[in-house]
Image (cartoon, helix red, strand yellow):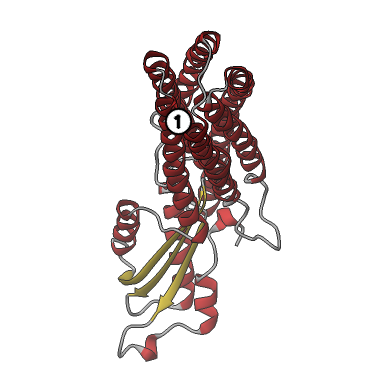
């Protein structure tokens, strides 16, 4: 294939990847907006019913829905800001914005949802307030509506997530929505159980226990989401299987004698950095080295489109100092591949 033909193929691949990425982002926005609308309506209904009935479980669920609503706003911001193009201050782009806002969403779940729910449970144990029959009925009706709405939002998120896993890892915005909705469904069931047992036994401890159970569930979910976001923000490598495939590809090239080191890092949902230190076979002059590096980087980009920053560092084997490439050749070989503009 000629150089111009390869460049045209790379451009077509880049356009297809961009269209897939935009389509996925549109679907993610719709999923987040559906969850946001459901949570806002449910939060208002739960809060009113909780205040009227004096139900700690309902107030805990209202806090949970408020936290989820705020988090969905964070996720919408994450989807928009993460698509900004690279600039001088951020040459690798803004892909990690998704992980930053996902981290803030996890903190919101922990503080506004988990801590408030536990507090409501403790307060209920201290006051031992008894609800009226009207309060029980209103509470159970609101929880039934919430179960349907949260379940519909969860089904929508799971449908989008089906078959979306790839070498870049899952979309943190979508993963957060799924975690929130799944936790919301479980929380509604816990709240309904607490309200029902309170109705049957007359003991507020059941409802207080449900409130604290909701809080502990939210704390666990928040911890898991925060840990995932933290790992990505620090700089997480790709999964071992993908790394091994890239390493095997490099080792299979006839011009490469040995792959001394292979480093990878996620730069965003559709962006991956690959840095390899390779030892070339003897007898290659500087022009051949440059052509080989360009061809290898283009092949990596074609096989793994998310690898939009590829760097090859040419090393020398022991006893091969006389054949070592000049610093100028090494500098040229270490640039990004054509798709990254390097």
Q: Residue at horizontal 35%, vertical 74%?
A: 280
**Relative to 218, 247 lies left or right:** left
**Relative to 337, 89 lies left or right:** right
- Quadrant of the image occupied by residue 209: top left
x and y, in percent, of residue 314 in the image: 42, 75
| Residue 113 appears in view | yes
Q: Residue at horizontal 63%, vertical 35%?
A: 70
**Relative to 128, 45 lies left or right:** right
x and y, in percent, of residue 59 in the image: 56, 27
Depth check, front residue: 258 or 208: 208
Depth check, front residue: 4 or 58: 58
Residue 336 vs 224, above or below: the answer is below
Circle 1 crowding by C-alpha within 10 Å: few under 14, some 14–19, many from 20: many
Q: Quadrant of the C terminus?
A: bottom right
Residue 313 vs 170, above or below: the answer is below
Q: Residue at horizontal 40%, vertical 48%?
A: 303
Residue 232 vs 277, above or below: the answer is above
x and y, in percent, of residue 325 in the image: 45, 82
Disc 1 target residue: 208
For numbered disc 1, what is the local secondary structure? helix
- Quadrant of the image occupied by residue 36: top right
Depth check, front residue: 185 or 44: 44
| Residue 8 appears in view | no
x and y, in percent, of residue 291 in the image: 47, 66
């Amino acid at each position: 294939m000629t150089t111009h033909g390869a460049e045209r193929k790379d451009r077509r691949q880049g356009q297809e990847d961009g269209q897939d990425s935009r389509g996925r982002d549109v679907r993610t926005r719709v999923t987040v907006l559906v969850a946001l609308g459901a949570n806002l309506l449910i939060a208002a209904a739960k809060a009113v019913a909780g205040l009227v009935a004096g139900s700690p479980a309902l107030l805990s669920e209202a806090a949970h829905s408020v936290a989820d609503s705020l988090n969905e706003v964070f996720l919408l911001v994450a989807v928009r800001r993460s698509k900004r193009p690279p600039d001088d201050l951020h040459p690798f782009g803004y892909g990690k914005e998704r992980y930053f806002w996902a981290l803030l969403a996890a903190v919101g779940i922990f503080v506004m949802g988990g801590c408030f729910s536990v507090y409501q449970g403790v307060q209920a144990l201290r006051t031992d307030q008894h609800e009226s029959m009207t309060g029980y009925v209103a509470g159970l009706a609101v929880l039934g509506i919430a179960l349907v709405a949260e379940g519909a939002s969860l089904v929508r998120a799971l449908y989008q997530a089906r078959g979306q896993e790839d070498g870049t890892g899952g979309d943190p915005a979508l993963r957060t929505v799924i975690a929130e909705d799944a936790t919301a469904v479980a929380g509604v069931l816990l709240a309904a159980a607490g309200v029902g047992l309170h109705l049957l036994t007359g003991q507020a401890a059941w409802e207080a226990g449900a409130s604290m159970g909701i809080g502990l569930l939210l704390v666990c979910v928040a911890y898991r989401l925060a840990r995932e976001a933290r790992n990505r923000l620090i700089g997480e490598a790709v999964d071992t299987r993908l790394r091994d495939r890239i390493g095997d590809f490099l080792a299979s090239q006839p011009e490469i004698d040995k792959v001394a080191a292979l480093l990878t890092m996620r730069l965003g949902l559709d962006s991956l950095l690959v840095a390899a230190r390779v030892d070339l076979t003897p007898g290659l002059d500087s022009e051949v080295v440059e052509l080989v590096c360009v061809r290898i980087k283009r092949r990596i980009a074609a096989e793994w489109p998310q690898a939009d920053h590829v760097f090859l560092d040419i090393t020398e084997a022991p006893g091969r100092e006389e054949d070592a490439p000049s610093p100028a050749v090494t500098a040229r070989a270490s640039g990004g591949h054509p798709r990254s503009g390097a």
